Image (spheres, rainbow, N blue to C red):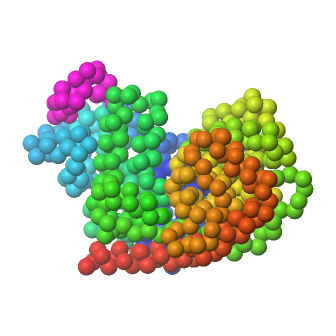
Amino acid sequence: MRICMILEGCYPYITGGVSSWMHQYIQAMPEHEFILLTIGASSQDRGRFKYTLPDNVTGIEEIFLDEALKLKRERKRLFVRQRKFSPEETDKLMELIYCGKPDWDMLFRMYQTERISPLSFLMSEEFLRILTQLCHKEYEYVAFSDLFHTIRSMLLPLLYIMGREVPRADVYHSVATGYSGILAVMASWKYGVPCMLTEHGIYTREREEEIIRAKWVESSFKRYWVRFFYMMSDAIYSRAAMVTSLFGNARKIQIEMGCDPEKCVVIPNGVHYERFCDIPLKKKDGFVDIGAVLRIAPIKDVKTLIYAFYELKFRVGNARLHIIGPEDDKEYAKECYELVGQLGVKDVIFTGQTNVIEYMRKLDFTVLSSISEGQPLAVLESFAACRPCVTTDVGCCRELLFGMEGDTLGDAGICVPPMHRQALCAAMETLCVKEEERYRMGRTGQERARMYYRHETMVRNYQNAYQEVMKRWQG
């Protein structure tokens, strides 16, 4: 089977999380041929892969959203064919601008079959007329120029990707909604084959959280940006033959957002248990070593972890914190380094990218301070290595620590509210000073990983999912 994986902002450009999952996933299915269709923010990343692509990856097509902005800069010297839009087309385009339920098939015909320029509509009288109506209806007290530039900057990347070529495949598998979801829907329409969706987190909800906090979005338009991402998620929820999630609560959210329950399937992540299960416990050396395996990025909330560890050092002087992972956001990483210096906190070690399996030997337990997660592999790897974990109560973390319905193994760590440094500090203190409890939780986590979260089980479930998707499409 020829599978086109559609990826946004992850593999093969950054490491960890979804990227690690994707790399292992492809390697585990040598019987299939994979093509990667990637979406990135900056064309400067073209070809800068952090992974050596597996042999069964036979091609990669890269799309960068900043290339859409070049069209705006070049429009004066490029001939942009002005096109008259029919009343029906104008009505459908209005639905797109209003972030409702646009006729995606019609849009795909315009931008794939007719090959009209992304700027053709954005420079048209119809666009200006619709925008004027929107301003009177919803943004009466907002400057029209602000609305104009906001809507254009929102729509241009979307129209741009709808005009791009997509490689042929037997099935299109998107690993998020958003732009990658739209490409999956468009490819399914163009070639008459199925598409499916896997969500590690709920992409739209994550974008909503980011937009609410974002300084670059004017408060008047935050609700509009949120509607835009909900519109794109609805497109693939409606078209996909199957929609998978990593845990039960994520499935519930997908259904709440309008996805057909019959399509929604839970396929948990899996860990290479054998790679971790024989790692010996750390030899006593007078320190309690805490590992945070993560990308240094705002969503991982490393600053709260640093503050919590700073307070921990007054209670447990022999604690050490190892922050293990790459600088995903260099500006944020710099702020983290500076915070450590400003606080004068000792025994914080930034390791950079390293071999987690080897480094696990140095750790007593792990911690995850994220403000958003799906089903983190870092927790599963910690469990497989018999290390308990302190996590924030996000995504599937509570379920991992305390078990799914029917799991009577017990607790494998401590769960605290996100962005709560006092609770995070207290939880780390508990695992530092209560050695026997730490060992018990570690053994519980290891048994939970062995029973419920094996990589080979996950791969088998996805292999069955591809067969089921083809069956549903043909039947």
Q: Is residue 156 visible?
A: no
Q: Is residue 289 left or right of residue 102?
A: right
Quadrant for the C terminus, please: bottom left
Residue at image point 69% right, 40% down: 308
Q: Is residue 27 left or right of residue 164?
A: right
Inspect this view and state whether residue 240 appears.
yes
The range drawn in magenta is: 125-150
Examine the image and state in which quarter residue 166 appears.
Answer: bottom left
Indicate the quadrant where residue 473 lies: bottom left
371 lies left or right of 185 = right
- The correct choice, above or below, for 46 with respect to 446 in the image is above
User: Between residues 108 and 295, which one lies in front from this camera angle?
Assistant: 295
Q: Give whichever of 147, 370 is nearer the camera.
A: 370
Q: Nearer the viewer, residue 335 or 118?
A: 335
Q: Is residue 76 above or below residue 439?
A: above
- Indicate yes or no whether the magenta region holds residue 304: no
Image x and y of residue 198, in percent:
43, 62
Q: Position of residue 307 (x, y in %)?
A: 69, 37
Q: Is residue 468 above or below residue 38?
A: below
Residue sticking out furthest to the right: 285
